[in-house]
Amino acid sequence: MKSLDDNLSVLGGVGPKSVEKFLKLDLQTVGDALLYYPFRYEDFQTKSVLDLMDGEKALILGEVVSPASVQYYGYKRNRLRFSIRHGEIIVAVSFFNQPYLADKIEVGAQLAIWGKWDKAKASLTGMKVLSQQQEDLQPVYHVVQGVKQSSLVKLIKTAIDEGYLDLVEENLPVDLLVRYQLLNRQEAIRAMHFPVDIDQYRQALRRIKFEELFYFQLNLQSLKYENRRADAGISIAFDSSALGEKIEKLPFVLTEAQQRSLQEILSDMASSGHMNRLLQGDVGSGKTVIAGLAMYAAYTAGYQSALMVPTEILAEQHYESLSQLFPELSIALLTGGMKAAVRRTALAAIESGEVDMVIGTHALIQEGVNYQHLGLVITDEQHRFGVKQRRVFREKGENPDVLMMTATPIPRTLAITAFGEMDVSIIDQLPAGRKEIRTRWVKHEQLPLVWDWVGKEIEKGAQVYVVSPLIEESEALDLKNAIALEEELQAYFGERVRIALLHGQMKNQEKEAIMQDFKSGKTDLLVSTTVIEVGVNVPNATVMIIMDADRFGLSQLHQLRGRVGRGDKQSYAILVANPKTDSGKERMQAMTETTDGFVLAEKDLQMRGSGEVFGTRQSGLPEFQVANIIDDFPILEEARRVASQIVSEPDWQANPKWSMLVKELNRPDRLD
Ligand code: ADP
Ligand code: MG
């Protein structure tokens, strides 16, 4: 019996070698392949050269009017030339290093050539000769090294031809399909890969997005519904005088905005309802200390609390600062990279209730972690804390209050829809005495001046971050760049500057040691890939140099810049970039004009249309395979309406009408 869970090897033409390759894309079963959608299409519709801009790629039709000649110049380098009549125009065509094409070029033949238009020379640099029956739209998939686009296309075609698409079950009730005029699931999946035309593709896209967002909302709404029950939450009766004493003893006075946010959090905790709150505040606004105080409050009421962060370095850092803040408490660290024995001890102490606070990464919600009276869970920046994670805690027998912290300003309406009915607290004020970070944008040519200045700053006692360029496509290249940069700087500064390198592929212990040296001032300059992005706190670091800054999005740049300006000294951010695009220039400009995260987030949203990526990663906003929570907001709203209608029906899960939904929600591999 055929099944969507069949291994790819059952398909014709797929051997063990291919199976191994597709595994790199996480494609294991035939079902995986069918649901691996392209992220865009190459539009092979034919165009007239008269409509083309300089440098534009297009498919051009024409009749060959001069025979092909091949000119060789050097090893494996050659150029094939001929011309075609395209309407009334004669177009010169060149193909580089594809001499074998000469066979196809016969005078009088009709050709379709995919190429790049040079307006000034009225010539076309050919890339492909296509048969005229070729489909107009060709899917483009995300691939990795060793996997070709064409082999993915072939794989998915074969799966469909062998009848696997017929096994895909509908997962939206008929009345929703009718109400919203959605394609059925099989049609939609076929059209996601091989649409007849762009219109059909859009229909398919709408259906798949609806499906994703609807299930997301159904999940969220059903949880919310359960949480609304009177006994859903816990009432944390904290000791306010003990907490007040703690606040008194802080080395600084809380800002008004911090006090207000803390009050809001504490009153949620004290009430028997379930807390579901978002704490927003720009980098450096002092969210962490508020989190710590909330955790302390939970402790005074006899509850454990947990703080979950995205990276091990951050976990270490929070662990340290909370240990300093609350030396009398027992605080445990839990990360994936811990030695088994250390981990076992920590787990036992957490389970017995000996531990008051737990700080860690995702390891906090893994199997085998059992809490004793967990009252409060806090998640920090860039962290996805979805419905699934919350259910994990509930299934462990607790329904703790939840506080999420983010440095990315998220519009209120969006926050509500994306996270459920959330309450929002905002720290919109920086601690007193902070100096605005001075930001300059320089070109690569000016680097010698920059390094010269950096040397002088270091002599004056400053510490410096240098962030190496981001290579999205390749972690290996990322690393290579960072190493090269470190060597270059070492050669430039020689003995007088102590330089260290930090990158994502290092072992945790190594990373820790390097961060520790930087914190304690043993290193002057830290070359790093983007691993320092989030939350790292070194008040003496006052200079941030970002190489090829135009490769980063606005919110990422803002996050990086926020690593400096954490103490009372004047800090600087230098963006090194020769941007090629207008949006790159705009981003550099925006960064030099403001340090206000809310203004930059607005800008980021505006620029989205031009292909920029809003920092959803940092914000903790949910991400989907196809849908985008910002672009597809209208669909999201609609999905939310339908989902909340359904979950408000009494005993909806028992209604056979919705059995399809219950089954889909309970699928073990659901992402959310
Ligand atoms: P965030 O987590 O919002 O990025 P942090 O909580 O890490 O910010 O705070 C940044 C720095 O400011 C820390 O060194 C912290 O001790 C300090 N800080 C926090 N609140 C205040 C305050 N009210 N006054 C002075 N310094 C503060
Ligand atoms: Mg923080």
Image (cartoon, rainbow, N blue to C red):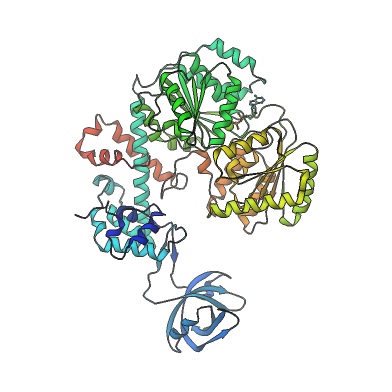
**In x, y percent, where is residue 534?**
58, 38
Residue 632, compared with residue 428, is above or below; it is below
Specify whether residue 200 is in view: no
The one nearer the camera, 267 or 406, is 406
Q: Quadrant of ligand 1?
A: top right
User: Residue visible at 49% across and 88% down?
Assistant: 65
The N terminus: image quadrant: bottom left
Query: Which image quadrant: the C terminus?
Result: top left
> Quick one: 218 or 314, which is closer to the camera?
314
* Residue 105 in sight from this viewpoint: yes
Query: At x 44% / y 81%, what residue is drawn?
Result: 111
Q: Which residue is found at the position 34% from the left and 19% from the top?
A: 231
Q: Is residue 270 left or right of residue 469?
A: left
Image point (78%, 41%), residue name:
457
Q: Is residue 256 left or right of residue 401?
A: right
Where's residue 525, x and y in %? 70, 42
Asked where in the image residue 661 lies, by quadrant, the reply is top left
Left or right relative to 539: residue 84: left
Residue 523 lies left or right of residue 106; in this view the side is right
Observer-nearest residue: 571 or 18? 18
